[in-house]
Image (spheres, rainbow, N blue to C red):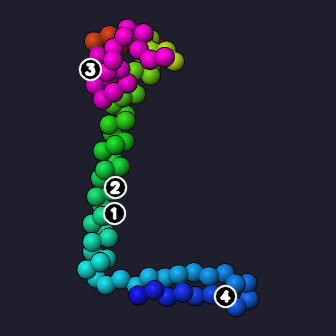
Amino acid sequence: MRIRRRCLTCGHAETFYEIDAHQMEHFENLQRFEEGVLKYMKLDTLKGDACYECIHWDNKGCTMGLPEAGGAFAQDCSLFQKS
């Protein structure tokens, strides 16, 4: 159900939506799923940061020519040397 309210003084309007308990449960599950995905992506991004701190990295990429540089396996690189 949609409810639209408008201020008679300034004309500002807002729309509110009413949902039932089943829809709310589904919405909350989607929120938890999204939070999990974002946490996973953030962890995956942190793994790739090693290349950007390595002495073999410049603005064009890995100077050692490693195609996977900057990816999730960056911290496992045997050539990694912190700058």
Q: CA distance from mark 3 to mark 1?
A: 33 Å
Mark 3 belongs to which amino acid?
Asp
Q: CA distance from mark 3 to mark 2?
A: 27 Å
- Prevailing SS of the magenta stretch: loop
Q: Pinpoint residue 1: horizontal percent, then vertical percent.
A: 41, 87
Mark 4 belongs to which amino acid?
Cys
Residue 31's label in the rendered image is 1
Mark 3–mark 4 CB contact (< 8 Å): no
Residue 76's label in the rendered image is 3
- Of discs 4 and 1, which sits in the foreground? 4
- Of discs 4 and 2, which sits in the foreground? 4
Q: Is residue 30 above or below residue 60?
A: below
Mark 4–mark 2 CB contact (< 8 Å): no
N-term-proximal mark, 4 vs 1? 4
Label 2 element class:
helix
Mark 3–mark 1 CB contact (< 8 Å): no
N-term-proximal mark, 3 vs 4? 4
N-term-proximal mark, 4 vs 2? 4
Q: Toward the viewer: 22 or 76?
A: 22
The residue pinned by badge 2 equals 35
Q: CA distance from mark 4 to mark 2?
A: 35 Å
Mark 2–mark 1 CB contact (< 8 Å): yes
Q: CA distance from mark 2 to mark 1?
A: 6 Å
Left or right of residue 7: residue 64: left
